[in-house]
Structures are given as C-alpha cells and as structure tokens.
Image (spheres, rainbow, N blue to C red):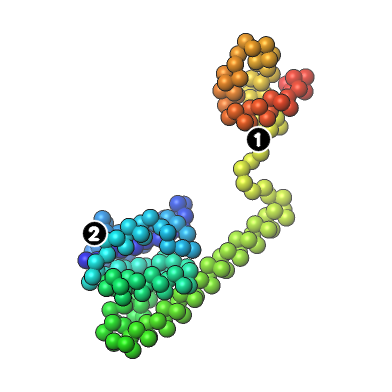
C-alpha cells in the first residue's frame, strides 16, 4: 500500500505543493497524513497515526528528508524503525536516487552500511539547517527588541481603551460605584475580562478620563 506523509512547520503554511506531488503518485487521500508542526521531535499526531497503519511491504512517500524531521538522532531512529522493524519502505522524493530504502535492501548488509552513511549525512544537514533557522529567529527578535518592538500579548490599560470604552467608563463608573449596575454588567459593557476590568477600574480617576 502507498502512504504519504506531509509536514509543514506551522498552521499558516500551505501543504498544497506537497499534497499535489503525493496525489500525482496515485496515493489515496485517506492514506496521506498531514501534520502542521515543528520538526524538532516526532510527537506529532498524524505521524504517530501513520505509524499505526504501516504494514510490512508498504511504501511511504515523503517530499524531503526535513519533512520527516529535523532532529539528527530522531530521523535515523525513525527511518530504521520503519524500514527494519515495520518492514516497510521509504522514498524521499526530493532525492529518490539516494533515498529509496528498497535499493538499499536489495544490496544486503552492504546496503545497510551505505544507507546508514547517507542517512547520517543528510540527517546532519537537516539538523544544522534547523539550528540556523533558530539562530536567525533569535537574531531577528534581538534586533526587533533593540528597535523597540514589543513581543507577546499587548498590555491593556487605561491608555489603550478606545474612545467608546472611555465614554462608557466615564458615564457608568458612578452607577457601578453606587451599585446601580453590577461589576459583571459593567465589564460586559466595556467588553473586558474580569482581571483586566478590575486592573483598570482600580487605577481609574473619573476626572482624568473624558
């Protein structure tokens, strides 16, 4: 049976290119497993689901080795598990001249040695690329911070309220203070969560907000 595996690094990335390539190999869509996750480890739901359906003689197609993963030791471990324990085969479409486990199996023990050498080399390259990506990301964040860019959730305070929220706060603060409206009603009017509401209300000075 033909099986396809696709991995993209995040929910924002598109898997269509890989999917089109696998469909062109006449792989049924129900046997194409897609993860939107980092390649740093193999605890991915669809990857683990795929391993559960693999049977002896199956053929797994993957677009590129780094789509399998970016962890040096993990790639080697998973490749050996699939090809030598589950008795299935893997074809890496980007470099199928070298990475078609069927070719190595036909060469016996010498094939295993050659496969291990090629796999170690390409896995090392994949891991180094992951490290370079992380380094570039860290450098980019450092530069952005140096330029004053803020990361994480934006802080919500009096100065971030909209004009409409300020008006509602001003007009209803006294009603809340005199228990004409409840805190729940007031925070719903402002569109704020409880923690944020009380953080703002505790700093609010009616005469300072128009």
Q: Quadrant of residue 209?
A: top right
Q: Quadrant of residue 158?
A: top right
Total numbered badges shown on the rendered structure: 2
Please state the horizontal and vertical placement of residue 12, each as a whole percent of the image: 46, 52
Please state the horizontal and vertical placement of residue 49, each as a whole percent of the image: 32, 57
User: Does any portion of residue 124 appear in the rendered image?
Assistant: yes
Front one among 18 and 181: 181
Q: Residue furthest right?
A: 207
Disc number for residue 156: 1
**Horizontal side, residue 119 vs residue 61: left or right:** right
Name the residue beneath numbered marker 2: 28
Q: Quick one: label 2, few (<14), some, or many (20+) residues within 10 Å?
A: some
Q: Residue at x 30, y 73 (%)?
A: 85
User: Does any portion of residue 171 appear in the rendered image?
Assistant: no
- Give the quarter of the figure containing the C terminus: top right
Q: Is residue 153 above or below residue 94?
A: above
Q: Residue at x 28, y 82 (%)?
A: 105
**Horizontal side, residue 40 vs residue 152: left or right:** left
As helix, strand or loop, the secondary structure at mark 1 comes to: loop
């Amino acid at each position: 049976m033909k099986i396809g595996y696709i991995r993209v690094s995040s929910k924002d990335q598109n898997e269509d290119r890989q999917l089109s390539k696998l469909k062109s190999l006449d792989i049924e869509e129900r046997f194409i497993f897609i993860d939107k996750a980092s390649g740093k480890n193999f605890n991915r739901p669809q990857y683990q689901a795929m391993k559960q359906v693999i049977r002896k003689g199956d053929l797994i197609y993957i677009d590129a080795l780094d789509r399998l993963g970016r962890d040096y030791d993990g790639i080697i471990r998973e490749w050996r598990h699939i090809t030598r324990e589950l008795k299935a085969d893997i074809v890496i479409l980007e470099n199928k001249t070298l990475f078609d486990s069927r070719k190595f199996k036909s060469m016996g023990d010498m094939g295993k040695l050659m496969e291990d050498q090629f796999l170690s080399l390409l896995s090392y390259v994949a891991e180094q690329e992951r490290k370079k990506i992380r380094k570039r990301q860290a450098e980019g964040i450092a530069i952005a911070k140096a330029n004053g860019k803020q990361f994480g959730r934006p802080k919500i305070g009096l100065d971030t309220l909209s004009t409409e929220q300020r008006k509602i706060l001003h007009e209803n603060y006294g009603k809340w203070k005199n228990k004409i409206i409840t805190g729940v009603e007031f925070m719903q009017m402002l569109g704020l969560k409880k923690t944020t509401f009380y953080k703002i209300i505790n700093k609010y000075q009616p005469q300072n907000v128009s």
